[in-house]
Image: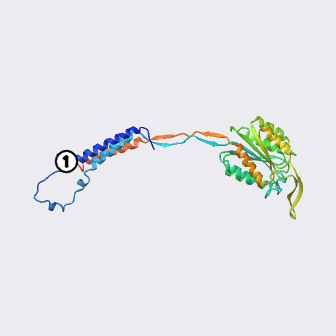
Amino acid sequence: MTIHNPEYLFLLLLLIPVVLWYIWEMQKSDASLQISSYKNLVQFPQSYKIRLRHTLFILRCLAVTAIIIALARPQASNSWRTQNTEGIDIMMALDLSGTMLAEDLKPSRLEAAKTVASEFILSRPNDNIGLVVFARESFTQCPLTIDHAVLINLFNSVKWGLIDDGTAIGLGLANAVNRIKDSKAKSKVIILLTDGSNNCGDIAPITAAEIAKTFGIRIYTIGVGTNGIINIPVPTPMGIQYQQVQSEFDAKSLQNIAALTGGKYYNATDNSKLRLIYQDIDKLEKTKISVQQFSKKEELFYVFALLAFLFLSLEILLRNTIFRRIP
């Protein structure tokens, strides 16, 4: 609670001489009666009127106090303040091709990508973040949202086999650009994570990057996995069998995409490097957002004005009934 006119509270000091004057008058106004002995009077108890003889004065003081506080205009304040926070819009594009099942990252490239990306999402509570996935085709798993609990649940539900196998990086980028291009945020970012080179789709990756550049979108590209021979689990009637394939991704193309849009290219060969990459992106992408917080005030003087009225009314009632004086 705040006081709009605190200077009026100094009027409460006037009650001090009033109280002192009352005490002085009470001492002077004691009645006297000459009697031979007062021993027999001690056995008679004091009446309630004697015990409550100061009630009228107390009620008058309370009424004056309430009036003074009402004049000072107390106010209830729901105050907010201006606060600077950090937040941007981020669209994540995740490769779901079959090679993402390779186990050079533990437990697999796909699961490692999901785990580290979830940590990244939780570390940025003020960001709008969304997710698109791609293989031979691309679709939006989650649009831009601040509800990160829902986003992580959708992220965790991503698995291989949702889309026909292939690596349409251009389609994945184009889908991500389409989802973020109309954002009003000053900073718009796409994080592209893939372990292969573009081998299908109607849109070339560099074309999608050029479109992103026209909308002021930066693209961070992450080539995940090691080069060379890798083992990929393949389900068979006899159980899971491992097939050896050559792991390669078009690093040059990913570098060009990042450079064209003002982003950065990374190569994640293990879990720790992937985690460091997201930490680096987290440091690079910080935007100050000023949040204006307003203060709402509610007048409370009427509460004290009502109390003053009640105290005065009670004093008048008692003065003319219970404490009525006969001249």
Who's the residue at 15% across and 62% down the image? 39
Q: Position of residue 130 (x, y in %)?
A: 72, 46
Three-letter amino acid code at the position of disc 1: Lys
Q: In the picture, which quadrant includes the C terminus?
A: top left
Q: Which residue is mark 1?
A: 28
> Residue pushed farthest top?
214
In which quadrant is the N terminus drawn? Answer: top left
Q: Position of residue 263 (x, y in %)?
A: 77, 41
* Mark 1 neighbour density, 10 Å: few (under 14) some (14–19) many (20 or more): few
User: Image check: 325 left or right of 238?
Assistant: left
Rendered location of residue 191, percent (x, y): 76, 45
Q: Considering depth in this image, is 231 or 75 the residue closer to the camera?
A: 231
Left or right of 220, for residue 244:
right
* Rendered residue at 21%/49% (across/down): 27
> Can you name the residue that lies furthest to the bottom here?
238
Q: Is residue 234 above or below residue 283?
A: below
Find numbered disc 1 in the image and state the secondary structure of the residue it sits on: helix
